Amino acid sequence: MTAAPDHKPTFSNLSLTERLDEAMPMLLIPILVVLGFLAIGSPSSWLTLTVSGLAMGMMIFIMASGLTLVFGLMDVINFGHGAFVSVGAFVGVSVLIALGDWTGAASLLLNMSAIFLAVVAAMMVTGALGWGFERVIVKPVYGAHLKQILVTVGGLIVIEQLIHVVWGPDEIFINRPETLKGAVTFAGAAMEKYRLLAVGIGLVLFIAMRMVLRRTKIGLIVRAGVENGPMVEALGYRLRMVFVGVFIAGSALAGLGGVMWGLYQEVITAGMGEKMMVLVFIVAIIGGLGSVEGAFIGALLVGLLQNYVAFLEPKLALVSNIALMTAILMWRPQGMMPVVKAK
Amino acid sequence: MSDPILSLNAVYTDIAQYHILQGVDLNVPRGQVTMLLGRNGVGKTTTLKTIMGQWTAKSGEILYDGQDIARMPVSARARAGIGFVPEDMGIFRDLTVEENMVLGCSSGPLDPKRKDWLLSAFPALGTFWHSEAGNLSGGQKQMLSIARAMAEDRRLYLIDEPTKGLAPAIVSTMAEALRELKAQGASILLVEQNFSVARALGDSAAVMDDGKVIWTGAMAELSENKDLQERLMGLSMEAH
């Protein structure tokens, strides 16, 4: 082949303003943390609230990551996602109750083993449930948003009622495993051990998800599918299969989130997932539908803001997240890190 | 005519309430470049999308290597060896040039020799190998779109207006790459509005009007006959 004409294009460097605009979503977290510090005044209270906010944010992120990818890949609005949170919590807590000797022992190894088994059981059950949900409820309504809302809300109600049938109508109280009770003190601030664990699990999951999405072929297909699904299929990939896989993984993550949230609140109800969906949707929307990184930043902002505001002005805590969503959508109507969809 | 790699027999395609293809009959000979010509809005892009499966044929046969693929999923058609370069290029803007190229290989990793060959044909892609594809210029995106389709061996390429809006220097790069592809034995069905490119590359031509193929023959015959051009397409190639 002959050489192409001499053509040496270059990119111009981005201006400082453009760089700042690009980085702004990531800068929002440290900005909020600093503002929180200035508003709260007391370093120990601020540290306690920051860890609490990060823990809450990580748990919301775990629940929201699957939802945002499912929407990004196939334009599916799944209001039934909350059902996987509830089922995960009930399955996980059932395992923890069954392993009462392990959770009651003052052994970190036994406690963590019990949590690990509870999480595995919850993820397996919610993953399988997600697969069935996709095949039976979601598959017939691809491309029809109104029908998706109606049938997935219907699915949510049915699953909630099934939880009542299996586990009874009452809420279930659960004690955290022995070694995760109480708090550690650092610089005068009390930080609950369980919240620190939640931050750690959330961070590990985010890094793992990012690596899968950035470093593997399947991650590449998912990212490309979020942007332009028909083209991915035209290159020879079975996007439907990928979508089913993502749906199962997202449901399993919701189950994991359910176990973690149940242990965080120390009480579970059939409607807990439904209640969480408000926060989960806020996070997915402000992050930019389809963006895992956006959901991560959005979840941390929501968790931090809610904790700071609840401390400073408890009456405003409920509206703080709606206010955050409104402000972010006025600034970036597609969310903080929107996925540019092919037309 | 040599044994066709692709034959469309009485293919009808509707988009919503519009009857776009109204009985397309078309043969794409093996190892040749077949130009699909016609005025705007006569169904050329829909024909390519119907062959690829992005629009479903309401009726008719699409025989690829003798097998009817009219009901086959899009991904299966691609895996059977059909490469597609859509009019909008289908570039993944948030992925790097490298990632776009990796996705072009659905059956395995990108072969280093093939990569070298493609980068010698499209050097700009090497320059921006690790840059997001959304930052490329229109011409570079078009190069990426074609290079991605060529990232692994395919037997039939469906290419929709690859030179649209491109500078002459880049058009010649494109034409050279397509000529090389043909020399390797690939068959190409090319929609092209640039008649000098069509004349230079085309072995045979099919002219569409009103959702049907109204003329087929040798490209040389069409390019030499101004009356025929004006009758089929309402204008002469000389005008371009």
Image: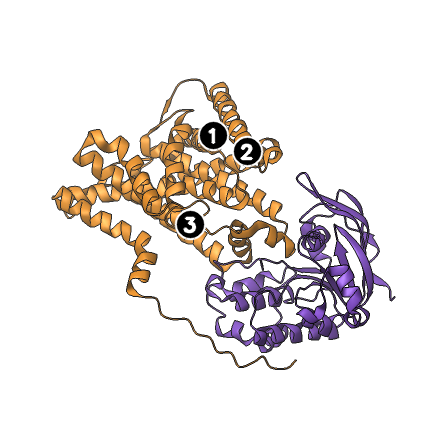
The chain in orange: A
Marks 2 and 1: which is nearer the front? 1
Q: Position of residue B113 (x, y in %)?
A: 63, 75
Tell me which amino acid carries mark 1.
Ala
Tell me which amino acid carries mark 2.
Leu
Q: Quadrant of residue B240?
A: bottom right
Q: Residue at x 58, y 38 (%)?
A: A143
Q: Residue at x 60, y 82 (%)?
A: A3
Alpha-carbon span between mark 3 and mark 2: 29 Å
What residue is pinned by disc 2?
A129
Q: Position of residue B35 (x, y in %)?
A: 74, 64
Q: Tag 2, which secondary structure? A: helix
Are the residues tagged 2 and 1 within 8 Å (C-beta)? Answer: yes
Tell me which amino acid carries mark 3.
Pro
Which is nearer the N-term, disc 2 or disc 1? 1
Q: Position of residue B5 (x, y in %)?
A: 81, 61
Q: Position of residue A102 (x, y in %)?
A: 38, 35
The chain in purple: B
- In the displayed structure image, the side of residue B37 where residue B109 appears, left or right: left
Q: Tag 1, which secondary structure? A: helix
Q: Tag 3, which secondary structure? A: loop
Is any part of residue A147 visible from this angle?
A: yes
Q: Which mark is residue A189?
A: none
Instruction: Please name whichever residue, B17 or A40, is drawn nearer the observer in this view of the structure.
Output: B17
Q: Is residue A167 above or below residue B98?
A: above
What residue is pinned by disc 3?
A338
Which is nearer the N-term, disc 3 or disc 1? 1
